[in-house]
């Protein structure tokens, strides 16, 4: 179905505004995605602060051209959507799409994206998608810092048991 020029300009303006404030962008390929799954995906991504929008590839390219990202835009075959976030969790778009794509077994794939001002291919975005969230990383860091203290306390408790008996 043809889209009027006014509607195309509105879509490009919306995407340009979104990309201007985005900390990271994921390009999502989807096939045979049902309305139910699409709604569930949007809900899960929204809970992580990620926006999801389906648009024509030419309109996405036009919006990306205004930003001047480094590198080369990855190939975008088939139907394409974009997921982006403006928040602190820069891995959230790629991670959310990757996790949901595992549930759907191939109906949803990462095609590439923009991370730290540069275009990345699907392989690099998948690697970024597997990075834990910032809260999980902070927890892991706290555990590492606390680990020597807890081991020392356990050792002291064991020594105390042998000395008092």
Image (cartoon, grey):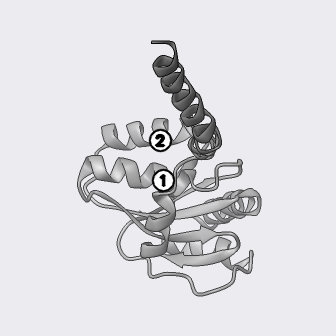
Element type where label 1 sits in the image: helix
Looking at the image, residue 123 sits to the left or right of residue 106; the answer is right
Q: Which mark is residue 64?
A: none
Where is residue 90 shown, x and y percent of the image?
Answer: 64, 55
Residue furthest to the top in view is: 165
Q: Name the quadrant containing residue 59.
A: bottom right
User: Which residue in the protein does label 1 denote?
Assistant: 95
Residue 107 in sight: yes
Q: Is residue 93 above or below residue 164?
A: below
User: In front: 135, or 50?
Assistant: 135
- State the separation of the CA atoms marked 2 and 1: 14 Å
Q: Which of marks 2 and 1 is in front?
A: 1
**How many residues crowd around disc 2 within 10 Å: few (fewer than 14), some, or many (20 or more)?**
some
Residue 83 horizontal/vertical position (percent): 54, 56
Vertical comparison of 114 with 11: above or below: below
Rendered residue at 59%/28% (across/down): 153
């Amino acid at each position: 179905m043809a889209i009027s020029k006014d509607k195309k300009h509105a879509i490009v303006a919306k995407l340009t505004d979104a990309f201007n404030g985005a900390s990271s962008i994921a390009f999502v390929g989807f096939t045979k995605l049902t309305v139910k799954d699409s709604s569930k995906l949007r809900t899960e991504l929204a809970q992580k602060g990620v926006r999801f929008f389906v648009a024509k590839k030419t309109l996405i390219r036009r919006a990306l051209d205004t930003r001047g990202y480094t590198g080369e835009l990855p190939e975008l075959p088939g139907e394409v959507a974009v997921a982006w976030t403006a928040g602190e969790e820069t891995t959230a778009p790629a991670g959310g799409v990757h996790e949901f794509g595992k549930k759907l077994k191939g109906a949803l794939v990462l095609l590439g994206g923009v991370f730290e001002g540069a275009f990345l291919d699907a392989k690099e975005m998948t690697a970024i998608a597997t990075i834990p969230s910032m809260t999980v990383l902070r927890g892991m860091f706290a555990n590492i810092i606390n680990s020597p203290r807890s081991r020392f306390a356990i050792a002291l408790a064991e020594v105390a048991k042998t000395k008092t008996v």
